Image: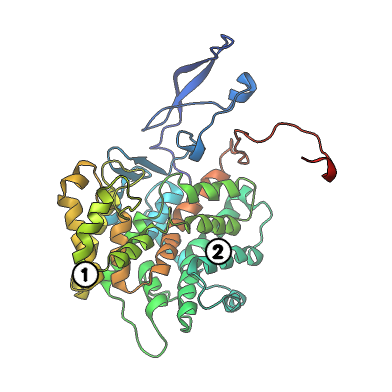
Amino acid sequence: MAKETTAKAMPMKKSGTVTLTDDATGKSWQFPVERGSVGPAVFDIRKLYNETGLFTYDPGYMSTASCESKITYIDGEEGILLYRGYPIEELAEKSTFPEVAYLLLNGELPKRGEFDDFNRMITRHTMIHEQLVQLFRGFRRDAHPMAVMVGVVGAMSAFYPSDNSSHDPTERLSHIHRLLAKVPTIAAMAYKYSVGQPFMYPRNDLSYAENFLHMVFAVPAEDYVVNPVLARALDDIFILHADHEQNASTSTVRLAGSSGANPFACIAAGIACLWGPAHGGANEAVVNMLREIGDKKRIPDFIRRAKDKDDPFRLMGFGHRVYKNFDPRAQVLRKRAHEVLDELGMHDEPLLQLAQELERIALEDEYFVERKLYPNVDFYSGIILRAMGFPTSMFTALFAVARTAGWVAQWHEMAGDPVQKIGRPRQLYTGAARRNYTGPDERS
């Protein structure tokens, strides 16, 4: 089922060399330049230390390619995001999240029979072991859903142990199917536990997004009918957040996986990294910022503060570290956000009115337009999830549900990479040089 298709991909090709010269000694070394199918070329420094005795210094790995990948491509200058070559806008408009998960994993969109088999496999794995259900009761009721998810997903390692399963493609697929199926169930249970409601078990007759909405918002005492507008918006949120190249959490999953760790432990590590407010918590920060503003009358003051370079305040949900033009995902969610607000009749809700006024200013104000500080995907996803009734503490948990598709695809690719090695970054040491131990009475 998971067949790495490379017919439309191009392997790296040598396209010249880069010469490095040490001015102090006059020595020079040449390193090959490699070019992929699209995007910037790289020069291969794998032999840098052996040949020169030098390391590179690159905090945050902003100029370092840690791996070769065929999954996702981003052009931040042009506002382009491609999954296996397909523009994100087309996938959001025409595809579904399970189909996109298949694409990320396998390299090609599935034929009907292939998709039916894949979807059936995911559906039949959505239940979690009853002993895992008991694990939830060990958490405080006010525990953050992400803390619960880190613990429960990590605990799945005890229920599905593996002995270097990353070397066995069939075993890898079994773990991947379980993760894609069970992480939404775990996220929904984390929410139910926090509000003191009974768990709602998965329903095999519902789509992926519909099933998640049912597990979160249904109660045993009455029937719950999934609103198709909300299900469509949530499916798009899942698609748009499914993968984003070698971001912090994906790199964490790959780094953990490079040691041969159990895949459930690797995904738990990714969830822990995603939890950070600089990563997956950004849409939660948008709603918190709106609460801080509080009233439309206060917006001009906060806009003034955002323009003041000496004021540390920043408008959350505007601009993007990677996208220097516009976030292509935001354009899709802007449409969905207004559809959801229309469907629910919530345009008059004060917090959402604040968001709409900020959106108007950002799209019209010369300061924001010149600097291309447009609303990003976190801004619109925060509005949608808030309107749907999700508490802000669940925003990052939903991000984790979506990003699991990218994590498992990246983990699968890494595990099958013949040149993959255990991750071991170097450092620039600036501590004390060697010194000798002295006794307590001799220390000055």
Residue 27 spot, x, y in % from top left: 57, 10
> Which numbered disc flags the more N-terminal residue, 2 or 1?
2
Horizontal and vertical percent position of residue 204: 42, 74
Looking at the rendering, which quadrant does residue 435 occupy?
A: top right
**Front-most of residues 3 and 272:** 272
Pointer 2: residues within 10 angstroms few (<14), some, or many (20+)? many
> Could you give the CA–CA distance between mark 2 and mark 1, rounded to whole angstroms?
32 Å
**Pointer 1: what residue?**
341
Residue 2 appears in the picture as rendered: no
On the image, which quarter does residue 207 sit in?
bottom left
Residue type, label 2: Val
Q: Say whether residue 414 is left or right of residue 184.
A: right
Under circle 1, the secondary element is helix
Question: Tag on residue 150?
Answer: 2
- Label 1 sits on what residue type? Leu
Mark 2 and mark 1 residues within 8 Å of each other at the beta carbon: no
Q: Residue at x 63, y 64 (%)?
A: 160
Res 433 quadrant in image? top right
Q: Does 223 sit above or below residue 160? A: below
**Residue 343 locus on image (x, y percent):** 20, 73
